[in-house]
Image: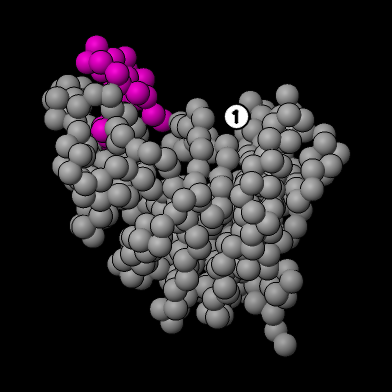
């Protein structure tokens, strides 16, 4: 039997976890990433180069069965170049849509899905004109790049416009209105070559300083109607993009109904508002490694290779805690029953994701107790 070899653009922790999920299936991997110390580099062949050199792309693609990517800021041109030679999943069109916040929000609006109000900002005059249209507070963001809170500035009053423009005005921008949400959620969905789809349970996410800190899965107090609404959004996006692989969609849960007159018009009568999508496996899905019947990483590989998709049911209740900036003593983590430690092999640095912990339990009360135990230990 000849085992497939998958090429992965990017060799960060998501690529690392894709490889770890693929090895039990007999898969082989090759990474392309300019970083010499990339977390996935010691798991498989790692070509140290940028994404735009055609000779490197030719060498990278030789002998591969398919290509995927582990983050959305790889070159769309490189994805198109590779797609002319072998299957590239998710398709480059999905990558292109997710790289530009204006394109992304317009995509969801065209699907009839609610988003935050937004306006294009190409000049300081555009910004000043957009503020009364969108309202304050609002978030000025670069349309491209930017993640974990980077490339974003909050405007709380009109006087903030000049400072924000001075900081970000050298790039195309978008002004997004704030959505008064109850909580942040995400849904992970997968689609295979043959159109087979599967969705994971909704996840509740808690951020601080623009970085995901905690995910709870399944999200507490989710009704079947809310799960169905999230799946409807995800499945419409998968079909519209002719998507193959795992797609993550970040959502705001908002108050809807007759008392929602304070919400922007587009969000009224909708309990879910799309924030953004990621055409890849996602940080909020790390809990699936121990906490779901099939991990998001194995599911992505199954979809890319056209294998039957796996079951997505949760195995009990899980909490995923990101380790940011510093690392705990492994003995402290592993002393907690139901704890699973994942380290990415990165050097500590402020604001850097160095690893994560997944806590599992049979019920929500026990999970809450284990989270509290973790909090006491780190304090």
Q: Residue at x 50, y 35 (%)?
A: 207
Q: Residue at x 35, y 23 (%)?
A: 154
Residue 163 screen position, x and y as percent: 31, 14
Could you tell me if residue 19 is visible in this image? no
User: In this orientation, which residue lies closer to the viewer: 271 or 214?
Assistant: 271
Could you tell me if residue 250 is visible in this image? yes
User: In this orientation, which residue lies closer to the viewer: 141 or 373?
Assistant: 373
Is residue 30 rendered to the left or right of residue 138? right
Direction top: furthest residue? 159
Residue 92 screen position, x and y as percent: 40, 62
Mark 1 neighbour class, 10 Å CA radius: few under 14, some 14 to 19, many 20 or more = few
Q: Residue at x 69, y 31 (%)?
A: 375
User: In this orientation, which residue lies closer to the viewer: 32 or 332?
Assistant: 332
In the depicted structure, whether residue 70 falls above or below residue 252: below
Numbered range of the magenta stretch: 151-177
Q: Looking at the rendering, in which quadrant would you find the C terminus?
A: top right
Quadrant in the rendering for residue 310: bottom right
Residue 274 screen position, x and y as percent: 33, 49
Residue 124: in magenta span? no
User: In this orientation, which residue lies closer to the viewer: 201 or 145?
Assistant: 201
Residue 170: in magenta span? yes
Q: Residue at x 27, y 41 (%)?
A: 116
Question: Which residue in the protein does label 1 denote?
Answer: 351
In the depicted structure, whether residue 75 falls above or below residue 36: below
Q: Looking at the rendering, in which quadrant would you find the N terminus?
A: bottom right
Residue 60 screen position, x and y as percent: 60, 63
Direction bottom: furthest residue? 1
């Amino acid at each position: 039997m000849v085992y497939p070899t998958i090429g992965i653009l990017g060799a960060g922790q998501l690529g690392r976890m894709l490889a770890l999920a693929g090895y039990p299936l007999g898969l082989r991997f090759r990474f392309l990433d300019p970083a010499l110390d990339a977390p996935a580099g010691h798991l498989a062949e790692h070509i140290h180069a940028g994404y735009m050199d055609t000779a490197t792309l030719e060498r990278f693609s030789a002998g591969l069965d398919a290509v995927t990517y582990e983050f959305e800021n790889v070159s769309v041109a490189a994805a198109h170049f590779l797609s002319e030679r072998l299957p590239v999943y998710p398709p480059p069109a999905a990558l292109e849509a997710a790289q530009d916040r204006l394109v992304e929000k317009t995509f969801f609006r065209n699907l009839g899905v609610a988003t935050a109000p937004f306006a294009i900002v190409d000049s300081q005059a555009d910004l000043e004109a957009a503020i009364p249209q969108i309202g304050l507070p609002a978030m000025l963001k670069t349309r491209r790049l930017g993640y974990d809170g980077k490339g974003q500035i909050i405007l709380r009053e009109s006087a903030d416009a000049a400072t924000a423009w001075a900081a970000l005005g050298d790039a195309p921008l978008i002004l997004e209105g704030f959505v008064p949400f109850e909580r942040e959620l995400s849904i992970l969905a997968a689609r295979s070559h043959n159109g087979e789809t599967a969705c994971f349970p909704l996840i509740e996410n808690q951020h601080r300083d623009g970085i995901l800190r905690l995910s709870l899965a399944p999200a507490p107090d989710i009704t079947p109607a809310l799960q169905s609404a999230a799946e409807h959004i995800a499945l419409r996006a998968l079909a519209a993009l002719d998507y193959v692989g795992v797609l993550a969609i970040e959502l705001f849960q908002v108050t809807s109904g007759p008392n929602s007159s304070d919400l922007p018009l587009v969000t009224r009568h909708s309990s879910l508002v799309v924030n953004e999508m990621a055409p890849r496996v996602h940080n909020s899905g790390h809990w699936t490694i121990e906490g779901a019947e099939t991990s998001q990483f194995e599911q992505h590989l199954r979809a890319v290779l056209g294998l039957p998709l796996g079951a997505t049911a949760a195995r009990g209740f899980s909490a995923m805690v990101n380790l940011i900036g510093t690392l705990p003593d492994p003995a402290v983590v592993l002393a907690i029953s139901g704890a699973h430690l994942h380290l990415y092999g990165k050097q500590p640095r402020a604001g850097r994701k160095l690893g994560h912990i997944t806590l599992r339990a049979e019920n929500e009360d026990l999970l809450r107790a284990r989270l509290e135990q973790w909090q006491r230990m780190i304090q």
